[in-house]
Amino acid sequence: MKLGPFELKLSRRRARVREFGIQSVGDLLLQLESAINSSSTNRYISRAQQAAETIRKYRGQATKGNLLTKNIINTRAAFTVGRGLGYIGPEAESAFVSEFFKANRINLAYLQQLARERCFEGQALLILSEAEDRIPRVRFLSWTDTSYEVNPDPFDYSNILSIDYRVGQSDVRLRQGQFAFFKFDTRMNSYEGTPLLAGLLNSIEDLDDSLTSWRTLNSKFSRPSAYFRFETEDDAAAFQTRLATLNNGSPWQWGDSLAGAGDGTVLQIGYGPYQSMLEEIHAKAKIISGHTGVPSHYFGFADLMDNRSVADDIRDMFVVVSEVEQSEWIGGFTDLVGRAIAIYNRRTGSRLDTSTGRIDLELVSESAWQRIAEIWLPLYLDGAITLETLLAKVPGIDEVKEAAAARAEVEARGGTPRQLGAQRVERAAAQDVGGVM
C-alpha cells in the first residue's frame, strides 16, 4: 500500500499498526499528513525507520552520519553497564545465579552488546528456555527482525501477559515466566521503546554535512587565487597565456618564481564564512551531546569542555543519565533471575527464593565516591544513619554481610565501627595538616 512517498508493507495478515513503530492509526495518519503536506526535515518518522537507520550508521553503511554514531553508542553502552552485573542474596540463590550467568555467558561483554541493542531498538527482550542441565538458557530476540508485539494487562501496565511474534509461517506466543522485557525512554503506558538516536539522526547527518563543507572551505583557504592588475586587457590576456605555459609548457603553480609588469595581489575568502561554519559544527555537537547524554569530548570535541565548571556539570549529567538507565536494567535482570529460579525450582524440586536477593550494576565514578565521602560518611559518623545504609551506597557489596563482618572485627578490638571510622578520619585530617605545615 502506498501513501504519498511512503510504502507500507504488512509482515503478516493479522499485523497491527504497532508494527510500524506507531501507537495508533491516528498517530499514523497525522504523521503521514505532516510528511506529505509540510516541509519537515525529519526523514525518519517511525521507530522501524529510526532503528534501521541507526544500525546502518553504526555499521558505516549509511550515506552519511556514520562518523559519530558508533562512538556515541559504544560510549553510552560502556558507561551504562559499568563493571557488570552482581547478585546480592542468600548463599544458595547466589550459587545458582552465578551458574546461571556462567551458563549463558552473561558477562561484561554480553551486557555491552545488549546495551547497544537497546540503543538500536529502544528496548530489549530476553527469552528463557529449559535445558538438559536444568539451568535455563537465555536468548535475545530482536524487534527489528521479528516485530514482536508486547501485550500488557490493560488495567496494569506493569503486568505483561504475553508477547507475540512470527517465525516463518508459524505464530509464536510467549507466556508469563518465559521472558524479561526492558523498555527505555517511553511513556508509562507504552511498550514501544525509543531508539537512542530517534529525533537526532537528522542532526547527526547535518553535522556530517557541516564537516564536509568545512573541509571544502579549508581546501579553498589553502589555495587562494593570485590576481594581477594591468593597464590594458591585452596585457592581461597575454600574461594569462604566459602563466599557462610558464614552466616548460606547464601551468604556473604556487611556489614557482614569477616576474611581470603588473601589480600582484591575492584573493582569499574572508574569515566570516569560516567562523560561521565552525559555530554551526559546535552547535550541532552540543545538541547531539545534550540529547544522548554523552559528553562532546568523547566524540572528538574536547575544546567544548575547556571550561572546568561546564565540564563538571556535563560529567555529572552523564553519570545521572547512566544511573537512570541502570534502574531499568536492574529491574529487568531482577525479573529475569526470578523467572529463571522459578523454572529451575520447577525442574528440580528445589525451593530457592525468587524474591530474596537483588541485582546490582556496579557504576563506579569519581562523583559517586565524592558523594559517599562528603555526604554519607559524615552522616554515619554523626550517628544519623546506620552502617548498612552507608555500605549500601558502595556498589557491588552485600551491606548486611559486610556490616556484620565489620562489627565482629572491630568489636573484637574493643570498639565500634563508628568509633574506628572517626579515629581514621581524625588521623587523615592530622596528616593533611602536617603536610601543609
Image (cartoon, grey):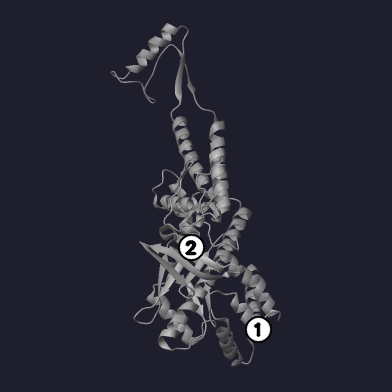
**Residue 408 placement (x, y as % from top left):** 58, 91
Q: How many marks?
A: 2
| Residue type (three-letter) at the residue carrying disc 2 | Glu
Q: Is residue 271 left or right of residue 69?
A: right
Q: Is residue 229 above or below residue 383?
A: above
Q: Earlier in the sequence, mark 1 or mark 2?
A: 2
**Residue 292 placement (x, y as % from top left):** 54, 54
Query: 266 or 168, which is in the foreground?
Result: 168
Q: Secondary structure at mark 1?
A: helix
Q: Residues within 10 Å of mark 1 (few under 14, many from 20)?
A: some
**Residue 106 placement (x, y as % from top left):** 42, 72
Q: Nearer the viewer, mark 1 or mark 2?
A: 2
Badge 2 is on which residue? 149
Q: Is residue 29 above or below residue 177?
A: above
Q: Quadrant of residue 237?
A: top left
Badge 1 is on which residue? 418
Whole-number angstrom distance, CA of label 1 to CA of label 2: 53 Å
Query: 76 or 251, which is in the foreground?
Result: 76
| Residue type (three-letter) at the residue carrying disc 1 | Arg
